[in-house]
Image (spheres, rainbow, N blue to C red):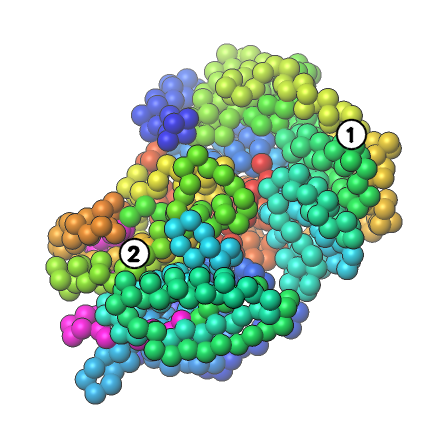
Amino acid sequence: MKFIDEYRDPRLAHALVARITRRVTRPWVLMEICGGQTHTLMRYGIDSLLPPQIELVHGPGCPVCVTPLEIVDKAIRLASLPEVTFVSYGDMLRVPGSETDLFHVKAAGGDVRVVYSPMDALRLARAQPERQVVFFAIGFETTAPANARAAWQARREGLKNFSLLVSHVLVPPAIRLLLGSPVNRVQGFIAPGHVCTVMGYREYEALSRDFRVPIVVGGFEPLDLLEAIAMLVEQLEQGRAETENQYVRSVTCEGNRPAQQIMEEVFEVCDRQWRGLGWIPGSGLRLRPELAAFDAERIFGLADTGVEEPAECQSAQVLQGLKKPLDCPAFGNRCTPENPLGAPMVSAEGACAAYYQYRRPAAGR
Amino acid sequence: MNDKRPGLEPLTCPVLLPAKDTVLLGHGSGGRLTAELVRKLFLPAFHNPALARLDDQAVISLDGLRLAFTTDSFVVQPLFFPGGDIGSLAVHGTVNDLAMGGARPLCLSAAFILEEGLPLATLERVVRSMQEAAAAVGVEIVTGDTKVVEKGSGDGLFINTTGLGVVPAGVELSADRARPGDRVLLSGSLGEHGIAVLARREGLEFDCPIESDSAPLHTLVAAMLSVSRAIRCLRDPTRGGLATALNEIAAQSRVGIRIEEAAIPVREEVQGACELLGLDPLYVANEGKLVAIVAPEVAEPLLAALRAHPLGARAQLIGAVTDGRPGEVVLRTRLGTSRLVDMLSGDQLPRIC
């Protein structure tokens, strides 16, 4: 298939592996940020092609995984209200809150709908003016523009029965947190290509400068990731620490200005709690006060509950690249996709779930 | 006789599921949740040797005659989709469940659960389609039932069909018969039914509309059996797709299965839709394909027989049964690496980004 097969070509992939193997002289720890990239690495077994000096650890870039328990509980409370049609992206439905998940709310009679686009939620609001339609606006900078656009459009149309439960998160503050940690092991990052398609990569250049760390903006196909790894190894071996762009067919330095503008118009930066990582200053987006009429937390008066993660889950170490999923004693027995203890086992893009699906040790079965 | 199969040893009485659990949509996905329901609730309750084989059909011996017996319910939405409708699907699905046991289909039953308010014209259209599909197969719908539920208690129209067939002497097909060294054949490209229905349901438009592959497979099976009886097992990879069908065979036979990504045919439109929606074609439903586990020495002639039939023109040899970890399906990717092809917990969910 055009524009897909080219990026999965075995001959070119092995040429890139050979290039990495020729160049590497000592061990390097690299982290891919985005869950989509983790998924590709596991699905194609790319880590098994690399020379032993390259260790890949998996970052916190799975939006489903890092949505805090508190917000999931709020979503569950909203979806249980008889007057509410609760609208979400599909893989949020399986995420367990402290007691149940949205699938069970739906089974108990809650009106929970899955959509591919926030515009579908707007359509539902227009079609059933007697019901309150709440859209679960989560994700990184990737989903934020479309979600912002939905709020913007609702305000323009004067919709009275549409609101958003917002829990957007931003990538650069999370990388800053990882790099500032005294136990950080990561020496180079593959930055998330779709986030950078929206935001450009100026923010990452600042990270490269401040922490002297090489960053390569990478795509999502096997060749994208192998090329990004080759570029990182090249920088590390040469002692350079720059931000480079591998994903040139999608990402520009400045990003998508109209998308950034609508985000700025609708959202403002706030502190945000990440599941598995805790509070990160300036790492979230919330609705601006001018759009408070579309803020589901305000409309339905949802107070914070201060709920805590299960203690056994080691997701913080996994999301910081300190541990691999297979290092966790609960992996595959007490923690499975059917019964996840924590964030990275929840979504298909979570690091633990990707290992579970594609690479389970014998003991785990 | 079946006490060596996984999951059957400790079950003597029905195990109560945890009280807080409720039925989820995922219990109908064909994935791990469905399997768990079958294993924990239905199998212990109804325990008997014919059921314990967990094949698509039960084979019952009666006065020297071997009867294949199967049932299936159809709840597809929308009722009409490119390439078929709930009526033709209800005929093809049950005929195929018989055919996967090597049986010649004899007759069908049809039970209708209708929701108050369903336009009679819709029902008429579905019934006509069922009749045409049955006539094309050469089976008659010889008995039936009609129930009507209140508005809101059903989704327009549900159909159940039950099928009866005869298994020819010498034909022994079952999911527990795969042996290391056997070959895996696939009769054609994956995912067309699932994507056609999904696209219609979600209002997705593609340049070339994708049609369901819904088709009766009994003549394809007959063509295979006329070439060789050394076929171990046939499955039609419906809900849960090829991945689930192979996982079931590997578990039932306590063998490993290895498949080659490059050999698995997927049409470009389906691949494109899957890329867009974040779905893996290995898990998408088919309604006119079969996967066959066959003895190695007859793989080539059987592949030729498949390809000579219009429904098997794109058939491929996609892999082999191994003595690897029992129950484990492994895929060799185009890059030459290996990965697990696991059963999914529930339905595939569209990813966020």
Question: Marks 1 and 2, Cα distance to the nearest angstrom?
Answer: 51 Å
Is B163 one of the magenta-colored residues? yes
| Residue B23 seen in the figure | no
Along the line of sight, the residue nearer the viewer: B316 or B195: B195
Q: Is residue A16 above or below residue B151?
A: above
- Residue under pointer 1: A266
| Residue B102 seen in the figure | yes
Looking at the rendered structure, the secondary structure element under dot 1 is: helix
Q: Residue B334, image x and y in percent?
A: 33, 35
Q: Residue A128, image x and y in percent?
A: 73, 50
Question: What amino acid is labelled 2 in the image?
Answer: Leu
Q: Is residue A229 above or below residue B117?
A: above
Question: What amino acid is labelled 1 in the image?
Answer: Val
Q: Who's the residue at 52% across and 33% down the image?
A: A37
Along the line of sight, the residue nearer the viewer: B309 or A25: B309
Q: How many marks?
A: 2
Mark 1 falls within which chain?
A: A
Along the line of sight, the residue nearer the viewer: A352 or B125: B125
Magenta part of the chain: B161-187
Q: Main secondary structure of the magenta part?
A: loop
Q: Is residue B96 above or below residue A275?
A: below
Question: Do tag 1 and tag 2 residues touch (Cβ < 8 Å)?
Answer: no
Is B261 one of the magenta-colored residues? no
Mark 2 falls within which chain?
A: B
Along the line of sight, the residue nearer the viewer: B248 or A180: B248
Looking at the rendered structure, the secondary structure element under dot 2 is: loop
- Residue under pointer 2: B290
How packed mark 2 is, by other alpha carbons closer than 10 Å (few <14, some 14-19, many 20 or more), is many
